[in-house]
Image (tube, grey):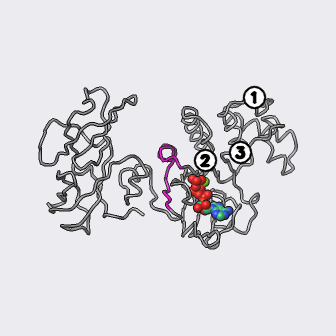
Amino acid sequence: MGHTTRDSGALEIADLHKSYGRVEVLKGVSIKAGQGEFISLVGPSGCGKTTTLNIVAGFEQPDSGDVSLNGSSLVPLPSHKRGLGMVFQNHALFPHMTVLENVGFGLTMSGIAKAEVAKRASETLRLVRLEGFEARYPRELSGGQQQRVGIARALTVNPKVLLMDEPLSSLDAKLRREMQVELRRIQKSVGITALYVTHDQEEALSLSDRVVLMNRGHIEQMGTPKEIYAHPVTEFAAGFIGEATFLDAVMRDIRGSESLVDLACGAQVLVPHRRGTSVGDRLRIAIRPDRLRISTADGAATTLTGIVVASVFVGSMQRIVARLADGSEVLIAANATTSLPGPDATISVTAAPSDWMVFPHGDQT
Ligand SMILES: Nc1ncnc2c1ncn2[C@@H]1O[C@H](COP(=O)(O)OP(=O)(O)OP(=O)(O)O)[C@@H](O)[C@H]1O
Ligand SMILES: [Mg+2]
């Protein structure tokens, strides 16, 4: 895998632009997916995820830009000749057809003999772990089973790329998590290239080889889940992928590779120095909840002091919200086994300077 052969599913989306009326909804979207790669498109509602997928699928034409598979443009081809499999949120199985007939539908349509259709449909059903369900009707299946039939139906025609638009969003949380694992297993075992749309950032992080974060028709950041979580390039990316507390800050002093910043609550903290910023600049600093520690070293130079306003047990973690002197709030995730302060307790919170993320003030657009 990772190699591009003539028959592989190397997908390239190049500089797509698309407007509806006077509104430009895609402003130059470019994504390269290698053979077998699982790529998620994630971003807020209306940012252009479905439009991008629809252009790849051939349901929409781009105003400019190209979509190609192994170097050949797909844009002139009708949807059914693009070699793509599709799974959508409301994928509606045919209610009057059995599971086997649903899964074999694409093959039947292309004129393949009945016995061969049944054989290949059965193989795909085994892949999604639904052997024995061939004769059932969709209404006799659970939500997760229906979803697996939808995936099997998309896979039976041997597509080079699998397109999925929020395929799990109608499932409850537990089933959804199970199906994420299943989906990843199926995609890996087939070795198919996958383009997956979700607005659930956790789902994107857990499923993908790479995540494409979209915002208002452009790509904000693209990278592995780890890269994007640990090194968000903008305040938007830091806020959308994973949780973070954001605080306004003014730079007071540069100390080697670190900066000392003043916060509105009156405290000062050390953060990594961000290139291009200087003393007096307004900044936004951010930190993940699990990088903050409740400390007893009250009054240390770079400690935040706050009052606990909420403390919620969430299984393995305790989530604590503390209010600082200026009214801003910080979110702390603490190990639930340690004894933790209750509401109204005054606490001190510290972080390693390197765990702070630093952004220019007002880059959030
Ligand atoms: N056929 C259309 N005509 C006019 N505007 C459209 C059309 N399709 C989409 N849009 C607009 O284009 C923008 C992008 O829509 P798109 O469906 O791609 O968003 P999305 O990222 O998939 O959002 P969601 O997470 O809500 O599904 C939105 O502002 C939407 O209103
Ligand atoms: Mg959408």
Residue at 87% of width from left, 41% of height from top? 114
Q: Are marks 3 and 1 in contact (CB under 8 Å)?
A: no
Tags 2 and 3 touching, CB below 8 Å = no
- Tell me the amino acid under the disc marked 3: His
Residue that carries the numbered disc 2 in the rendered image: 166
Task: Ligand 2: give its quadrant.
Answer: bottom right
Picture coordinates of residue 324 (x, y %)? 24, 45
Q: Amino acid at mark 2?
A: Glu
Q: Earlier in the sequence, mark 2 or mark 3?
A: 3
Q: Secondary structure at mark 3?
A: loop
The residue tagged 1 is: 140
Foreground: 187 or 137?
A: 137
Amino acid tagged 1: Glu
Q: Vertical placement of 309 versus 279: above or below?
A: above
Q: Which residue is mark 3?
A: 91
Q: Which residues are magenta?
A: 199-215
Q: Decide: is 80 above or below 301.
A: below
Q: Quadrant of residue 93?
A: top right
Q: Disc 1 to disc 2, how far (Cα)?
A: 23 Å
Locate residue 270 relative to residue 31 in the image: left or right: left
